Image: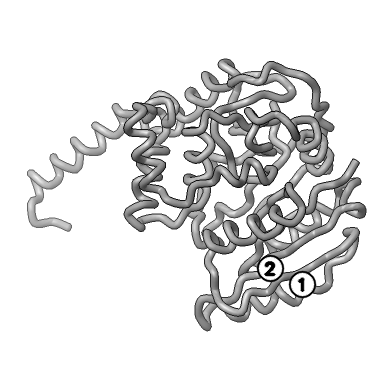
Amino acid sequence: MRLSPIILFAYNRPWHTRQTVEALLKNRLAEASDLFIFSDAPKDEADKINVDEVKKYLKSIKGFKSLKIIERQRNYGLVKSIITGVTEIINIYGKAIVVEDDLITSPYFLEYMNDALNFYNNNESVISISAYIYPVKARLPETLFLKGADCWGWATWKRGWDLFENDGQKLLNEITNKKLGKEFDYDNSYPFTEMLKDQIAGKVDSWAIKWQASAFVKNKLTLYPGKPLVKNIGFDNSGTHCSDSTKYDTVISQNPVTIKNIPVRQNRLAVKAIKKYFNSLRPNIIKRLKIKFNEIKRNFIYPNKK
């Protein structure tokens, strides 16, 4: 089996980067895999110390079949770095496994990714492979399909990445014209459409929402594990795009995943479970009304009190 190259995107988080690499090295296939690391340049002097520390660590990495570090001479930012980096490697190798510097992966992550990439290599309905699944309460099958794409530990082929649309407005127009907004937002349980609008307006800098939308409007599927093979450790205020949160926390499965024939269609049980999970993230409406009422009452009784 020809193994897919691994792409790692790193910037200014030395501790997180080390955790990500050490987790990858625990994979049996690590020593037979080629690792490409895109190391971004600092955007200002404040980031330079940590960026330099990351670069120093990257040069000390051992344990992969080969290691190539691409150091950017100017700051690309996460979006440009990922889009250009994935495109560059996939155009050469035809497929790739992608991780960022805040992801802890299962010891079976690389096996799952490579097995799935090979198994679905010629299936045009499948656009990508994901190692992350939301921490739902329902018991899901070992593998399943969902419409769209994901960004925390993923893989794709050139034929899949060629469908990536970088113009957010085009994607929004297609979602609107085809009346796909409700479905795209999991029956309005999560504001993916608003995220896309914010990206278009420059309020957020996200390649992932465009990847998700690109796959969705083309009616493409992504393979997911029933139990997560990755955990994001970046929600600790250390990253440019991640605030402090535990709502996406997962417990990484320590079991291998068998890739086998399953129906190549969206799994209804998983969709239902994810909707329920998304709804659980929304503040209780009664609690919100009470807070608003108390705020109005305070302002009425003490109009000048801050």
Question: Would you place residue 236 above or below residue 289 in this image?
Answer: below
User: 69 or 51, which is in the foreground?
Assistant: 69
**Residue at 59%, 58% in the rendered image:** 82
Classed neighbour count for the residue bearing mark 1: other residues with Cα under 10 Å, few (<14), some (14–19), many (≥20): some
**Residue topped by disc 2:** 14
Give the quarter of the figure containing the N terminus: top right
Q: Is residue 86 left or right of residue 30?
A: left
Number of marks in the rendered image: 2
Q: Are marks 1 and 2 in contact (CB under 8 Å)?
A: yes
Could you tell me the amino acid type at mark 2? Pro
- Percent coordinates x, y for residue 236 in the rendering: 56, 56
Could you tell me the amino acid type at mark 1? Tyr
**Residue topped by disc 1:** 57
Classed neighbour count for the residue bearing mark 2: other residues with Cα under 10 Å, few (<14), some (14–19), many (≥20): many
User: 48 or 85, which is in the foreground?
Assistant: 85
- Percent coordinates x, y for residue 129 in the rendering: 68, 37
Give how far apart the Cα atoms at labels 1 and 2 are: 8 Å
Question: Would you place residue 262 above or below residue 175 in this image?
Answer: above
Q: Is residue 102 left or right of residue 213?
A: right
